[in-house]
Image: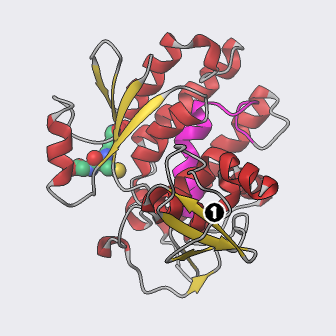
């Protein structure tokens, strides 16, 4: 059973990130259709997902359209109880549900002052009092959730759950605008930035097209605080170590160079997402270590 999921630009669409993580981080199969925010592409894409107004929106195998990230989480959890979207323990599950719902409905100052932009990290951003209040609330409920559920690792309710997926864009904002949080929240942010699904999403976000002007800010830049990607660059031509694409098995047409070796892919998107973060892609890393 495969789902269709409509999303916006990966670098900028925080709700789309939540929606996609509900599949990717829990091993659920999904076919993605993407449209650029602020263009006619988005309403055009949504025509196929009537009556959705926003992304993310999914269509189930039997053709039912489910918009709203919280509804997507609940529907997937009901259909795939084995996937572990919510914690099994009833008390931890209640905490996770509350956290996701509060994120869905709140944190408006943080969201409007610091829109998610996973392509860059700024510094010197001077959060307003309203943003600082949102960050304090975030730290309160994160810490409460971890204590309440006895979470040992960095995630909010024990194992990674839908509650963590809901806060992944906030982690992106804290990283992207260098927002002040204490050590416990900073560890949670670092775990998001290193999470394999988050890394793949961010890498694809660099391959989605040009920067969106709406998200450009004048703050000074700093290096992205997540794992530093292996150095790789797009190159015009082969020959490459491999004759067929590590992802599709088709003949290679687009190339990247890393560590003095050239590797091929069957399209620009797959080449560029690999350039952005080679280690995010296990099939490429297998090729790199074999090649
Ligand atoms: N409450 C919705 C919010 C979705 C949302 O606002 N998505 C934005 C993109 S991040 C969107 O589709 N904007 C297009 C528009 O509002 O026309 C959810 O949980 O999915």
In what quadrant does ligand 1 lie?
A: top left
Give the SS element for disc 1.
loop
Q: Position of residue 122 (x, y in %)?
A: 55, 78
Point out the image quarter for the C terminus: bottom right
Relative to 97, 53 lies left or right: left
Q: Does the magenta portion include 145? A: no
Q: Which residue is mark 1?
A: 277
Q: Does the magenta portion include 160? A: yes
- Which is more toward the observer, 96 or 48? 48
Q: Residue at x 52, y 32 (%)?
A: 22
Q: For the stretch drawn in magenta, what is the main secondary structure?
A: helix
- Which is more toward the observer, 44 or 56? 44
Q: Can residue 11 be seen?
A: no
Mark 1: is the Cβ under 8 angstroms from ligand 1? no
Point out the image quarter for the N terminus: top left
Q: Residue at x 61, y 29 (%)?
A: 26
Q: Position of residue 156 (x, y in %)?
A: 70, 37
Q: Residue at x 19, y 39 (%)?
A: 46
The crowd level at tag 1 (other Cα within 10 Å; few <14, some 14-19, many 20+) is many
Q: Can residue 172 be seen?
A: yes
- Which is more toward the observer, 206 or 107? 206
Relative to 117, 249 lies left or right: right
**Vertical side of 281 occupied by 94: above or below:** above
The stretch in magenta equals 155-174
Q: Position of residue 282 (x, y in %)?
A: 70, 47
Q: Residue at x 54, y 68 (%)?
A: 255
**Vertical side of 262 occupied by 246: above or below:** above
């Amino acid at each position: 059973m495969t789902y269709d999921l409509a999303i916006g630009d990966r670098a900028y669409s925080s709700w789309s990130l939540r929606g996609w993580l509900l599949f990717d981080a829990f091993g659920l199969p999904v076919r993605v259709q993407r449209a650029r925010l602020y263009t006619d592409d988005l309403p055009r894409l949504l025509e196929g997902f009537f009556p959705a107004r926003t992304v993310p929106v999914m269509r189930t195998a039997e053709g039912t359209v489910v918009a709203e990230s919280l509804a997507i989480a609940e529907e997937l959890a009901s259909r795939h109880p084995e996937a572990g979207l919510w914690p099994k323990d009833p008390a931890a599950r209640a905490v996770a549900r509350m956290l996701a719902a509060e994120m869905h409905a709140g944190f408006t100052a943080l969201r409007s002052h610091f829109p998610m932009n996973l392509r860059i990290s700024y510094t010197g951003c001077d959060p307003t009092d309203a943003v600082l209040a949102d960050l304090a609330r975030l730290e309160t409920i994160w810490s409460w959730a971890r204590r309440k559920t006895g979470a040992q690792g960095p995630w909010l309710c024990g194992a990674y759950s839908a509650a963590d997926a809901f806060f992944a864009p906030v982690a992106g904002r804290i990283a992207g605008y260098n927002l002040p949080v204490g050590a416990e929240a900073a560890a949670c942010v670092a775990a998001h930035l290193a999470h394999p699904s988050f890394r793949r999403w961010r890498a694809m976000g660099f391959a989605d097209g040009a920067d969106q002007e709406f998200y450009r800010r004048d703050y000074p830049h700093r290096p992205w605080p997540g794992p530093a990607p292996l150095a790789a660059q797009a190159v015009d031509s082969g020959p490459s170590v491999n004759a067929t694409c590590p992802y599709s098995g088709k003949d290679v047409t687009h190339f990247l160079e890393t560590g003095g070796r050239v590797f091929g892919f069957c399209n620009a998107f797959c080449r560029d997402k690999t350039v952005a973060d080679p280690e995010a892609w296990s099939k490429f890393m297998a090729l790199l270590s074999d090649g």
